[in-house]
Image (cartoon, rainbow, N blue to C red):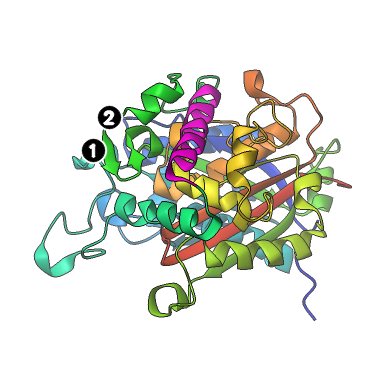
Amino acid sequence: MATGIKDKVAILGMGCSKFGERWNDNAEDLVIEAFVEAIEDAGIDKSQIDAAWFGTGIEEQHVGKSAVPLSIALRLPNIPVTRVENYCASGSEAFRGAVYAVASGACDIAMAVGVEKLKDTGYGGLPQRSRGAVNDLYWANASAPGSFAQLAPAYCVRHDVSAQDLKRAMAHISVKSHDNGALNPKAHLRNKINEERVLNAPMIAEPLGLFDCCGVSDGSAVAIVTTPEIAKALGKNNDLTLVKAMQLAASNGREAQHNSWDGSHFVTTRAAAKRAYKEADITKPRDQISLFEVHDCFSITELVTMEDLFISPEGRAVNDIMDGVFDADGALPCQIDGGLKCFGHPIGASGIRMIYEMYLQLNGRAGERQRNDNPSIGMTHNLGGFPHQNICSLTIIGKEGA
């Protein structure tokens, strides 16, 4: 019987490029930037990597349909390289491939890479594959802001929350993320804002205003993983960072095709969270998790995810947000690096970027934004697709013995 992967895989090294409008760099440049940091952090030579997984969401824009560009960019020694794609959870999918390869014994050392180069396409938001051709729309008659905005009225109806109270909580989320991003030298957006500016910003899709939406960015992130035994043999003897759980849940059609879903939450997040907590032996997530990152593509997404992860009680996320529970100095910080909102959202890189921040925090290397309460468990929530059709990937990492 399967027992899960808890403590079977250690993170040997990680790296992340600066996110933002990287006009003078191509996807390969971004990958190299993140890889150099990761390989130096791991303290190994690239010849020691047995296999790699490459996550990118919109391959038509920069790297093509195969993993060959990654192997060429890094001059990998003819090892297996696999390209994966799972909407905005493509980075987490690459990480899952590398982690499972090590946990299974198929590889001693494996690498996960995520990248996206979006700013050169000319689109303000995510580009369509066909750039508008009628016969090849990626998601016909749907937009990301329009779809995610519908979570808000559904949430208000389900939990008897006023639209005004919800908007104020969403504004607090955005202000919090900008405050955090201002302390992050690799973040795309580093400007502080206030609640009034959020509430008076141009409307994108009611009730989502300009500051309720994450940025579209260029960037890359890399993770190198191995077994705890090999990590120690390589000199990583102090405070190993171990993978405690990895779970993925995909929509099965219920949300879009059956009226049992009321549109106020993510079915996949709740399913993945239950499995991840069981795999990591977490029974009280609000008490046991030190800090976390969620897929805050929009402020409303972050809000409902607090309840989908069983951190906030049903209908109480608004209260927890306004009480500052998830602020950088709160009891359970969320998006301490600025999140998708301000660190940025290069689709294929985001999942690994979230893990990168948890890794830095657990190792006391997060600079000005470092939590000083000795964090021991970090969780990331990476979502791909729309509320009615999506994939949720959850990763929990922690210190040895946690």
Numbered mark located on residue 354 in the image: none
- The reply to whether the magenta stretch includes residue 170 is yes
Which sits in the foreground, 109 or 298?
Answer: 298
Is residue 376 toward the left or the right of residue 102 in the image?
right
Q: Residue at x 45, y 21 (%)?
A: 194
In the rendered image, the quadrant that contains the N terminus is bottom right
Q: Nearer the viewer, residue 5 or 145?
A: 145
> Residue at coordinates 47% horizontally, 27% vertically from top-left?
187
Q: Which residues are magenta?
A: 162-180
Q: Which numbered dot is residue 23?
A: 2
**SS at mark 1 in the image:** helix
Task: Tell me the chief SS of the magenta region.
Answer: helix
Q: Which mark is residue 120?
A: 1
Q: Residue 236 occupies which quadrant of the picture?
A: top right
Q: Is residue 54 visible?
A: no
Q: Position of residue 346 (x, y in %)?
A: 40, 43
Amino acid of disc 1: Asp
Whether residue 351 sits left or right of residue 214 in the image: it is right
